[in-house]
Amino acid sequence: MIASYFQWLNDTHGLNFSVFYDAFDRSRFLTGLWTTTYICVVSIIASMVLGLIGVWLAGGNSRLGRLVVRGYVQFFRNTPPLVQLSFFYFAVAGLLPTVSDGASGQSPLVSGTGWAIIAFSLFAGAFNVEIFRAGIEAVPSTTVEAAESLGYTRLQLYLHVVLPLAFRICLPALNNNLINLVKTTTLAYAIGVPELLYAASQIWSEMFNVREMMNVLLVTYVALVAVLVWIMGRWEKAMRIPGYST
Amino acid sequence: MRNGTTDLPVLKPFRAPAPIAPSGFAAPTMLGGGTLAAFAMLFGASLALAQVTARPVGESAVTVLLRWAPLIFQGFLFNILISFLSMALGTVIGVLVGIAQVSLVSSVRKTAWGVTQFFRNAPWLVLLFYAMFLLPFEFRLFGLTIAFPAWVKAIIGLALPVAANVSEIVRGGIRSIPSGQWESAEALAFTRAQTMWMIILPQAFKRMIPPWMNLYAILTMATTLISVVGIQDGLTITRAALVAESRPELMIPMYLLLLLMFFAYCYPIARATLALERRFNVKA
Amino acid sequence: MASRHQLGEPVVVIEGVEKSFGSFPVLKDVSLTVRRGETVCIIGPSGSGKSTLLRCINGLVPISKGSIKVAGREVNDASLDKLSLRRDVGIVFQQYNLFPHKTALQNVMMAPIHVLKQDKAVVEERARRLLAKVGLSQKLLAYPGELSGGQQQRVAIARSLAMNPKVMLFDEVTAALDPETKKEVLVTIQDLAAEGMTCILVTHEMGFAREVADHVYFTDGGLIVEHGSPADVFGDPQEERTKGFLDKVL
C-alpha cells in the first residue's frame, strides 16, 4: 500500500522516495538506522559510566586522579569531535595490532563502528562529568548536614541522600547532552561507518534523489531525537517527587 | 514564611559560588596553561617516539612536521574565518527569529518556535549536507548573478543550527527578565517595540553573552565538518600531509598538533564563558 | 519555677568552650550543665553564638578549646565514635532539612535502618507511632514538598526521635514558621519535655521559654551573661544586657 503510493509518487510527480518502495534501498536505510541506534545506545551507556567514574575520581582524595579527570574533561570539551574521531580511527588504530579475520587477510582489532563508539563515549562522557558534578554541588549543604547529624557515613550519605537528589537535579542537562550525542553520531560518516547518514548518501548518489533523501534523513533524525526526549521525559516523570521541582 | 511550595532549601534557586572578582580570570588561565602544557608534553613525547621509531632513511619527524605545520595552521585559520562568518550570519538570523519567538502574534510565534526546534534538533552535519546539495551554485536576483561557491554554502549550512541556537538564547534571555519590567514600561506608555529595544533587550543582553560564547566555541569546533563535504580546512590538510608523507608514526603527532591548535583557541573561550557566567550569575 | 519532674544525672556538660571562625571568636568561655529530663532554653540576640553552641554538642562543628561531654563521653575526642554520639544527640534545624525525595514515613525510617541497621518492620512500627505522636498519622505517605512548614518540622522531630536520642537539640525550629503552624510545633516540643526528654532549645519564643523551660540561659557576644529559672531571668534580670534585650523583644 505505502510502497505503491510512493511508486506512484515517483512515476507521476518525479518525487523519488526510493526507501519506501524499493526493497534494497529500504534495507540499506534500515541497516543504517539500526547502526545509528546501536552506536547511540552503547555510547549513551558508556558515556554515563565514564561520567560517574570521572565525578567519583574528581571528588576523590587522589591528586593525580583529579588532574587526570580535569585534563580529560577539558581536552574533550575543547577540541573538535571530528578531529578526535579521526585521531582515534587513523592514528591510534594504527598503533594497535591487527588480528587474523579467520579467512585470508588481517582485520583491525577495533572496527570503525567500535572507534566511533569509543570516540563518542569519551566526548559525551567529558560533558557528563561536569553535569554530574554540578548536580552534586547543587544538593544543599543543609540537607547534607541533616544526614550527618543522623550519623550517616560518607558512603551512606552519597548513596541514600546526595546521589538520588543530584541525579534529579542534573537530568535536564543530561538530557541535552544525550540529544547532542545522538546528533554527533553522524560524524561516523567521515570514517565510513555505515550509519544512517552514510546509508542515505549511498542511496542518493545512486538514485539521484538527494532532495527527497535529505528530507527523509532530517525527519528521521528529528524523530530519533524525539524518541530519546520521550524516553527521558518518561524517566524524569517516573522520578518526579510530589511537591518537589528542580 | 511559606511561599507556594518552595520553602525547602532544595527548591531555592541554585546559587553559584561567590561571584568571581576581576582577578577571576587569572587562576583559570593558569589552570588552562597546565592542561595545555600537559598536552604539549604528550605531543612532544609522541613526536620523540616518532623520531625514534622512524625508518633509518628519510627525514627526521621534526623536519617533516615543521614543513607541514605552517600549512596546517593556515588551514586552521580558514576554520576560524568560517567560524566568524557563520557566527555573524547565524546571529543576525537568530536574533530576528528569537524576537519572533516572543511575538504577540501567535502564528509568528509558533512558526518561529517550530523553525527553531527543527534546526536545533537536526544534526549539524546533515544540515551542512542540506546546504551543500540543495542550494544552487548561483542564483539570479534582479538580473544580477550571485555565485554560491562551496565555502559560501558551507557558511550558510553552519549558520542554520547557529541561528536556531541563538534564537533560543535570545528567547531565554528575554524570558529571564521579570514581567514587572514589561508592566512598568507599559504603565509609562512605552510601546511594545520601545519596551523591547530600550528596556528588555539591554537587560537581557548580558545574560545572553555567556551562552552565545559557548555556542561560538561549539561552532568553531564544528567547522571541521566542512572537510567532510570537500572543503579544504585544517583537518583536510592534516590528512593530505599524512597521505603525502605516508609515515604512519607521524599520525599521532600530526593529529595532536591540530587538536592542540583548536584547544589553544577554544579553551580560553570556555574559561572566559565560565567566568562571565559566574559574574552575571547565569547558566549557559 | 519549680521543676516539674525529678532531675537526673548530668547528660550534657560543657566546660570552658571556645570557638572561633578564623580570627572571629563566636564562643568565649561557655560553660553549662544539662541534667537528664531537664528542658533548657538558650536565648539572646542574633549572632551571639547560640546555634554554633548547639552544633558543637553533636560534633557538627569542632570546638577550639574546652570540653563538651555528652553522656560521659568527650565530644572533641578524635577517637570518639561519631555514630554513637549522633545516636544519642538528635538535632532539629530551623529549615527542617527533610530529605525531599522520601515520604514522611521513609524520612523517619531511613536513619534507623541505614545507620543503626535495625530491622525494617520494627523501625516502621516505631516510625508510625512517632508520626502519630506528632499528629501526622494522616500524612505518612506525603512527600516533604506536599507538607506545610509546621508539618515538615514535626516530621523532622519524629525523624530525630526515631534514633532514640538521650538529648534533643532544637535550633530555632519555629523561626521559619508562620504564627499558626508555630503553635503546633511548640506543643509537640512541650509534650516531649513533659514526658521527660532532655531538651536544649535555641529559641526566640520568649513566652514558650518562660512556660516550658526549667532553666534559661541568656547569651550575648559569645558569653553566657546570665542564667537561672525562667522566673528569675524573665521576672528579675540582674544584668543590664539582659534587661536591654528583654525590653526589646517582650
Image (cartoon, coloured by chain):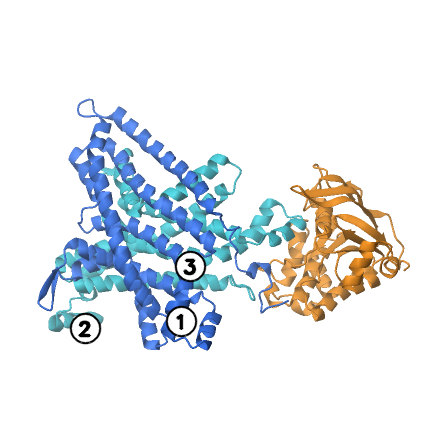
Q: Chain B is drawn in which colour?
A: blue
Q: Are marks 1 and 2 on the same chain?
A: no
Snapshot quadrant of residue C149: bottom right
Residue where numbered disc 3 is placed: B207
Q: Colour of chain C?
A: orange
Residue A5 is tagged as: 2
* Camera-side mark, 1 or 2: 1
Does B160 appear above or below A14?
above
At x 43%, y 39%, the residue is B31
Nearer to us in this view, B120 or B25: B25
Q: The disc labelled 3 sits on which kind of residue?
A: Arg
Snapshot quadrant of residue C97: bottom right
Left/right of residue C104 with respect to residue A234 in the rendered view: right
Image quadrant containing the C terminus of chain C = bottom right
Chain letter of the residue carrying label 1: B
Q: Where is residue C105 shown, x and y percent of the image?
A: 65, 62
Q: Where is residue A45 shown, x and y percent of the image?
A: 40, 51
Does B138 appear above or below C165?
below
Nearer to us in this view, B231 or A36: B231
* Camera-side mark, 3 or 2: 3
Mark 3 closeness class: few <14, some 14–19, many ≥20 residues within 10 Å: many
Mark 1 closeness class: few <14, some 14–19, many ≥20 residues within 10 Å: some
Residue where numbered disc 1 is placed: B195
**Element marked by disc 2:** helix
Name the residue at the top extreme: B56
Image quadrant containing the N terminus of chain C = bottom right
Name the residue at the front extreme: B188
Left/right of residue C60 with respect to residue A160 in the rendered view: right
